[in-house]
Image (tube, rainbow, N blue to C red):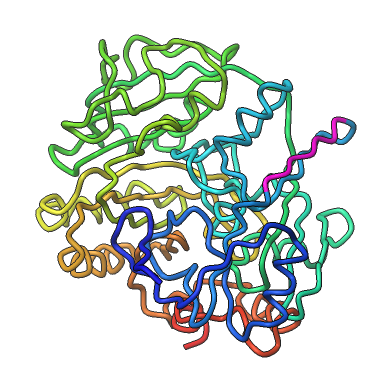
Amino acid sequence: MPERNNWAGNYTYYASVLLTPATVEEAQAIVRDTAQVRALGTRHTFNGIADSDGVQVSLEKLTGITLDEDVRTVTLGAGIRYGELAAWLHQRGYALHNLASLPHISVVGGVATATHGSGLRHGNLATAVTGIDFLNAKGELVSLTREGNPDLFSGVVVALGALGIVTAITLRIEPTYDVAQTVYENLSFDHLKDNLRTIMDAAYSVSLFTTWQDHRAQQVWLKQRVGEPYAPEEFYGATRAATRLHPLAGHDPVNCTEQLGVPGPWHERLPHFRMEFTPSSGAEIQTELFVPIDMGYDAILAVEALREKITPHLHVTELRSVAADDLWMSPNYQRDSLGIHFTWKAEPEAVAKVVPEVEAALQPFGALPHWGKFFTMEPRVLQRRLPNLTRFKNLAYHHDPKGKFLNEFLENTLYL
C-alpha cells in the first residue's frame, strides 16, 4: 500500500493494512480476525500512538449522531470530528463546555489522548464523556457509563487505545452560547509571578503565545463568554490589538477564528483555527508538557533559560490552563495544570535534541506529556509520575489479555 503519514508529515505509519469498515459489525469481524490492530483517527498525533504492527482501522464511516435532550447528552460515532459535531449541536441549540485549538480532530481521538482547550474552570475534552462503547480483543461490544460503572469509568476514557476500538461516545452538553475573542500584545512575564492563576482565569478561555524572547508573551488571546465582564482596553500592561493576528508570525490571520471582540457562536471562537482552513503551520512538530499551575511561573522561567536553544527551531509556544480531573491516565489527574505547548518547525533532528533538554528543565515540576505529541521522556520517569498506571494496566489486561491492541508506542512508554 502507498506510504501514509500523519497530518503534519513528521511520522510515517508502518502498519501494513488500513481497513475502513462501514458498520460496527464489520469492525467487530476485523477485530476478531486480526492478531494486531489499532484505530486510526484524523492523524493529528505526532508520534506512533495510532500505529500497529498489523492492521489499522479507520472508523471514519461511523458518523451517526443522536441527541438526548432529556438528560442533555449527545452520542456520536467514532468518525465524527469536533468541528462537525459543534456545528450540528449549535443548530439544535446546544454546545460543549470547551473545544481544542483545532476543530479538525476526531472526538474519539481527542478524548483518548486527553486533548484540551484552555480555561482554569474547564477540564480537558475527555471530562465531558458520560458513556463509551468499544470493541474488546474478542470483538465484543462493551458499553460503559460514568453512572453505571463508577469504579472503572475513570480508567476507560483516556485509554490511549489500549482497551480496544472505540465505536461511539456520549458527551455531556449544555445550552448554546456566544463568545467574543480579543487579542492583546506584549504581556511581560513579570506579571505572571504573582498573578498566573488570575491571568489564566481572566476569561472563559485564555492562551498566551510566546517565542521566549524579551521575557514576554507576544500575544494573549482572551475568549469571553458573552454576558461575562467584557475584555478591557489594556490587560496587565498588554495592549489590545487593532487588527486580526495569527499566533505564528508571518502567517495570514484569515486561517484564524474571528477576533476584535466580535461576538459569535461558541464553536466559531473557542478554537483558534477555522475548520475550512489548514490549521496552525501545517509543516510542524508539536510537543506539550503539563505542570501543576501553582508551579507554573517557575516552570516558565526554567524553559525561558533555554531560549537560545529553543527559539531557532520554534514557531511559537502556547501557555494554557486545564482544570484537574479524575481520569486515571489524564496528565491533569488531580491537579490544575499549566500546559506548555511547543509548535516546532519541521526539523526532526533538531527537535529530537532540544525536547529532552526541555523535559529535563521541567523535571523538578513533575511534568507529564500530552499523549499525542512528540516527547522523549524516559519510560521509568514517566511511569513514576502516573499514580494509576498499575490499575490501568490491569484494566487493559482484562479487555485485551493477549495484547492485541498493544503497539510499539505503548510498549515503550508504559511497559518497559
For residue 332, above or below residue 242: below
- Residue located at (67% from left, 71% from top): 164
In depth, the one of 338 and 101 nearer the eye is 101
Q: Position of residue 192 (x, y in %)?
A: 33, 36
- Residue located at (70% from left, 88% from top): 401
In depth, the one of 202 and 221 nearer the eye is 221
Give the number of marks: 0
Q: Position of residue 412 (x, y in %)?
A: 44, 83
> Is residue 382 magenta-colored?
no
Quarter the N terminus occupies: bottom left
Instruction: Please state if 192 lies on the left or on the right of 79 as rendered.
Output: left
User: Which quarter of the figure has residue 260?
Assistant: top left
Task: Please indicate, yes or no, whether residue 199 appears anywhere in the rendered image.
Answer: no
- Residue located at (38% from left, 59% from top): 6
For residue 143, above or below residue 196: below
**Range shown magenta:** 63-69
In depth, the one of 155 and 20 nearer the eye is 20
Instruction: Please state if 233 lies on the left or on the right of 395 as rendered.
Output: left
> Is residue 64 magenta-colored?
yes
Q: Position of residue 385 (x, y in %)?
A: 50, 72
User: Which quarter of the figure has residue 357?
Assistant: bottom left
Of all residues, the one furthest to the front in this rendering is 1
